[in-house]
Image (tube, rainbow, N blue to C red):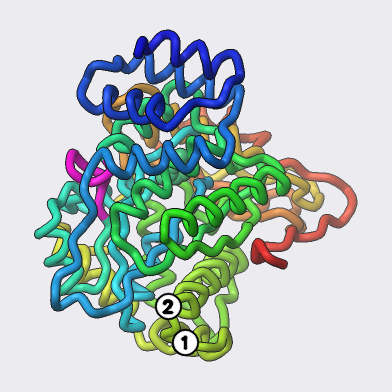
Amino acid sequence: MIVANLIAKKRDGHAMTEPEIQFLIAGYCQGTVADYQMSAFAMAVCLRGMNDQECAWLTRSMFESGQQLSRTVSDEMPRVDKHSSGGLGDKVSLILAPWLACCGVHVPMISGRGLGLTGGTLDKLESIPGFQVDLNDAQSDQVLTIAGATIIAANETVAPADRRLYALRDVTATVESIGLITASILSKKLAANLDALVMDVKYGDAAFMKTFQDARELASRLCSVGAAAGLPTKAVLSDMNQPLGQAVGNAIEVNESAQLMRGEGFHGSGFNAPALDRLYRLTRYLAATSLLQVGVETNRSQAEARLDAHLASGEVMERFCMMVDAQGGQAKFPLSVAPALTLTAKQHGSVQSINCAAIGQAIIGLGGGRRQVGDAIDHSVGITMHVGIGDQVHPGDPTLTLHAPVALHSEYASQLQQAVRLCDQPIETPPLFQDLES
Ligand code: URA
C-alpha cells in the first residue's frame, strides 16, 4: 500500500478498510509512516470524519500496537477507570483515582499530557518533584498493590500508537475529531485491562466538543465502540463553558486537588466555595458511577455516602500520598507556584461568560503547555479564577489571579483583563452534568 494514496482516500471522504488502517498505524509505530504523513492523515480524519466501523478498527489497531497491562493473581479487585475528553482546569483524575481506591477497587489509569488548550493529568502530576509517570508493567502493578491506584503514561509497550499520535495531534490542530478522540481514549483504556470505564465527555468553550450535540455524539461513539470491544462504558456529559474548579495550570491544579482531597471546608455533603463544590460534585458523581458499574455499590445514594465518608476522614489524601510516594514523588503540598498578580473588576455586573480560549492560550504562552512536541513545561505558572458564570461582581472584586514570572505580569494582565465578560442582567449558572441516557 502507498501511504499517500491512503491519505488521499480519506482526504476525498472515502471510508478506509481495516487492513488500510492497520497498515497506517503499524507503519507509524515502526517508522515507515512519517510524522508529516500521519499529521496529514489526522487532518483528513478531522475534516472528513470516520464511521463507527472505521473508528472501531482504528481503536483496535492502536490498542494492538502494544500490550495489555497484566492482571496479577493478587489482583482480584474490580479494575475501573474514568477518562475525560479534555477540558480546562480538569483535575478530576487526580482526585477520583485515590478516592475510588479507598472503596476497594483498583484504578490503573493510563493518562495523557496536555492536548490543545487543555491541560494533561501527566503534566500536572509531574509538577510533584520526583513523580514518575513512565512505569513498566511490573512497576505499575506494584503501585497498584500498594496504593490501589496508579496514574501512568502510554509507553513503548502500552498503547504506543496513542503516545505518538497524541503528541502529534496536540501541535497540528488535529485534536477535535470524534474518531481520533474515541480511538485515542479507548486504545489506552483497553490496554489498562479494565472491568468498566466511565467517560466524562465535556462540551463548551473550554472543551474539544463545543456543543452539547457533538459531545453527545462523541459519548455515544465511546460507549458503542467500548462495548463492542468488550469494555462496558458509561458516559456523563459535563459543562465546560468555564474552567472546572478555580485553578488552571499544573502545580496550582495539584494544590487545588489536595485541598479537596484533604476535605478542607467539606461540610458533610459539599463545599461552601462554589468552584470547589462543582469539582467535588462532578468527581463524586463519576466515582459513584464506577462503583455502580462493577456492583461494589448497588444504589447511588449509598455509593455517594461511602465516598463522602472517605473524604471526611482524610483517607483520600492519604491514598493520594501513598500513590505519589510509590511513584517516586515527594508528597509535600502545597507545591510552589509563580508570583501572583490579581486582576479586579472595573464595573458592576453578572459574569456572563469566561473566555476560556484566552485563559488556555495564556497558560501555553507562559510555558504551562506545549507549542511543539517535546517542549518543556513550566509547572509553576497558572491562573486562579475568583468568579464563575452567574456570579455578581462589584468594582474592585478580584476576578482572576495570574501566577507567572513578574517580568511577564503586565503583558499577560492586559491580555487577560477582558477574559471575564460581564453583563447587566442576572445570568443562570449552567447545569454541571447529566447522564448520556437522561
Ligand atoms: N483524551 C485523550 O486521551 N485523547 C484525546 O484525543 C482527547 C482526550
Q: Nearer the viewer, residue 233 or 200?
A: 233
Task: Please tell me in which quadrant of the rendered image residue 159 appears.
Answer: top left
Q: Name the secondary structure under disc 2.
A: loop
Question: Which residues lie in the magenta part?
Answer: 152-159
Q: Rounded to the nearest whole Å, what is the CA distance between mark 1 and mark 2? A: 8 Å
Q: Nearer the viewer, residue 68 or 265?
A: 68
Query: Which x, y percent locates residue 398?
Result: 61, 51
Query: Which x, y percent locates residue 294?
Result: 42, 78
The furthest residue to the right: 425
Which residue position holds label 1?
Answer: 297
Is 307 located above or below residue 224 in the figure? below
Q: Name the secondary structure under disc 1.
A: loop
Q: Amino acid at mark 1?
A: Glu
Q: Residue at x 10, y 59 (%)?
A: 138
Quarter of the displayed picture in which ligand 1 can be seen: top left
Query: Which x, y percent locates residue 390?
Result: 76, 57
Which residue position holds label 2?
Answer: 294
**Image quarter of the C terminus:** bottom right
